[in-house]
Image (spheres, helix red, strand yellow):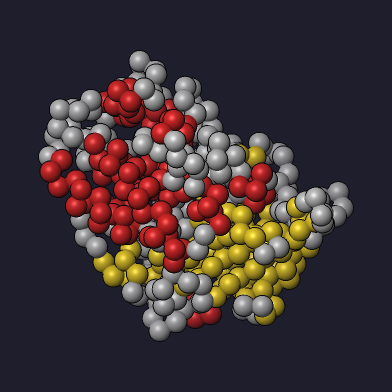
Amino acid sequence: MTLTSMGGKRTLTLAALAAGAAALVVGLLIARGSGPTIAGAADHLDAPGLTPPGGDLRTDLTDVYAFRNGANSVLVMNVNGLTAPGKPGLFARSAPSVAKTKAVSYYFRVDNNGDAVADHNIRIQFGKPRGAGQVQPMRLTLDGKPLVTGWSSPFGQVKIYSGSDAKAFAGMRDDPFFFDLNGFINILAALDVLGLDTDPTNNAKSLIGCTGKRTDTFAGTNVSSIVLELPSAMLTGADSKIGIWATTNKAGTQIDRMGRPAINTVFNPNSPLPPDRAVDGKSSKKNSFNAAEPKDDQAGFRVEVEDTLGVLFSLNNAGGALGGTDDAADDAAKIKGLADILLPDILTFDTASDAGFLNGRKPADDVIDAELGLVTEGLVTTDCVGSNDKSFLTAFPYLAAPSA
């Protein structure tokens, strides 16, 4: 395992992120118990009971991406996960409460000095839907100053708006996250011993050689996307390295946040992985995590991360149900090292590098394959789904058209 420094931040290597993002899928699958239902992807439904934060899919972040296009940085956030083909997915403009209606904002948060505190805030707001296409007025600001104004795009169309050297798109797109849910369920036979996987036909060996039918579970589902491209120099500080996370906010209250895949969905109680289940008497920390700031992650959530990593590491122990050969003697030290890296929950990104994951994240990056072989220590190296169901665009807004 190699740890590298990134502008004062410690960024994930493959070995580190494997435990986190692969854990995400593990957790989501177990949470649904029996049967391959579409439970979620990187950050879908990460409030208690697999519900959307704030009780609204429009404020539920699903994925965050950051990648380079020459001298520019491209930032993407998706909400409204699991939208069926042809269904419109509006952005929130307000949310009702007993007293009054509260305005909703979407944010890209940018840390450029490694202290896990936002140095730049890009705010996106939407107005009331209008017309037959239900388009919404859109306004983007950078640190309170106007950046782009325009409209969301009608379903299936791409309307791009520019201003202040930046351009933006908002509208429905194909969900860019791809993986084989059934394949991951098959990996979890070892968890039968925990009483969490009750399907006796599961077989971790079934993915080796990619035998049998493999399907991208998210094929044909859509998300509401906000895509922004702007000069990297508008975000960076003393060097080219930054950290990115997204939040959704109602008035002054933070509803959801996401940097890397996996963190809140899996690691915080009531995580599906023991010892963080409800039966263990732990109250849920998922909403607390969503409302927290990255700078407080180590103090507030490190114990939960270490608990869950302990379960994941045990799956490959010698003599275990998966037939592992790993000597567990050094697991404790590895787990502490990974907890140091997994928190704070920030997507680290060198804006001067064209490399993808783990440097930021490109839509086409096969995150699962990068992680799976490591979390199983070579037992299974792929989910046998190597690309999205639709080809990504080579130009802005980069994401594929939504399924109609």
Does 125 sit above or below residue 223? below
- Location of residue 136 (image quadrant): bottom right
The x, y position of residue 310, in whole percent, is: 27, 42
The x, y position of residue 180, in whole percent, is: 43, 34
- Work out which quarter of the rendered image holds the N terminus and state it: bottom left
Does 402 sit above or below residue 300? above
Question: Farthest residue toward the right?
Answer: 131
Q: Report the residue at 62% width, 76% height from top.
A: 142
Q: Is residue 379 left or right of residue 398?
A: left
Question: Farthest residue toward the top?
Answer: 200
Asked whether the viewer can see residue 67, the reply is no
Q: Report the residue at 27% width, 30% height from top.
A: 208
Residue toward you, 65 or 332: 332
Q: Report the residue at 46% width, 78% height from top.
A: 236
Question: Farthest residue toward the front?
Answer: 281
Q: Is residue 23 left or right of residue 16?
A: right
Count every numbered label the image shows and give the total.
Answer: 0
- Work out which quarter of the rendered image holds the C terminus and state it: top right
Q: Report the residue at 82% width, 56% height from top.
A: 100
Does 123 sit above or below residue 113? above
The x, y position of residue 166, in whole percent, is: 62, 74
The x, y position of residue 150, in whole percent, is: 75, 67
Residue toward you, 174 or 91: 91
Residue toward you, 377 or 60: 60
Asked whether the viewer can see residue 34, the reply is yes
